[in-house]
Amino acid sequence: MFTVLLYLAAAGSLLYSYRQDRKKTKKSLMVAKKSFLNMLPDLVALFILVAIVLTLAPPSTIQKLIGGQSGFWGMLVASVVGSITLIPGFIAFPLAKSLLDVGAGLSQVVIFISTLMMVGLATAPMEIRYFGKKQTLIRNGVAFMYAFVVAFIVGGILG
């Protein structure tokens, strides 16, 4: 429902902008389209790479590597996998539930989802082009450390 509200707000804002200045609105839409088309090849390549990696990792391997008894080692594995994997949120959260159902540890799943959402090693080359190397490294490093903090807190409270 919230997503529908966001789409309605975006459409309403676009309509408002169009009524205020048609020429500027059309120009901004063309700039957005060009930007999207410039990024599309990189995004498609990343999605294909992620699909291949996820297909090659069976559930038994996932359970062995990030199971409830894997401790810090499992958290480290989950954080690395999460950092290099590119999955949208609407797939990531059901995946987290599936991982928990097959025996993955809570802290391991929390750190996997946290790094999946916040750390972007797969997207780093594209991010460096737009934001610079230093900013990309700082953002990813802080996000990686923060994921461990969150995993320890959630694991300590709920585990």
Image (spheres, rainbow, N blue to C red):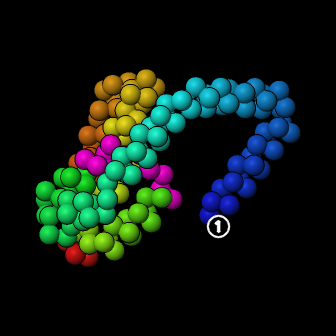
Q: Which residue is found at the position 62% from the left and 29% from the top?
A: 37
Magenta stretch prevailing secondary structure: helix
- Amino acid carrying label 1: it is Met
Magenta residues, start to end: 80-90
SS under mark 1: loop
The quarter in which the C terminus is drawn is bottom left
Q: Is residue 85 magenta?
A: yes
- Decide if residue 144 is on the left or right side of residue 69: right
Pick the front one: 146 or 105: 105
Please say whether residue 17 is visible from this viewpoint: yes
Using the image, determine if residue 4 lies above or below residue 15.
below
The quarter in which the N terminus is drawn is bottom right
Pick the front one: 110 or 70: 70
Please say whether residue 107 is visible from this viewpoint: no
Q: Which residue is found at the position 14% from the left and 64% from the top?
A: 70
* Residue 108 spot, x, y in % from top left: 24, 62
- Decide if residue 131 is on the left or right side of residue 71: right
Q: Which residue is mark 1?
A: 1
Using the image, determine if residue 13 lies above or below residue 96.
above
* Residue 123 spot, x, y in % from top left: 40, 35
Q: Is residue 126 magenta?
A: no
Q: Which residue is found at the position 38% from the left and 28% from the top?
A: 125
Using the image, determine if residue 109 lies above or below residue 15.
below
Q: Which residue is found at the position 28% from the left and 49% from the top?
A: 81
To which quarter of the image does residue 120 belong?
top left
* Residue 158 spot, x, y in % from top left: 26, 76
* Residue 30 spot, x, y in % from top left: 72, 27
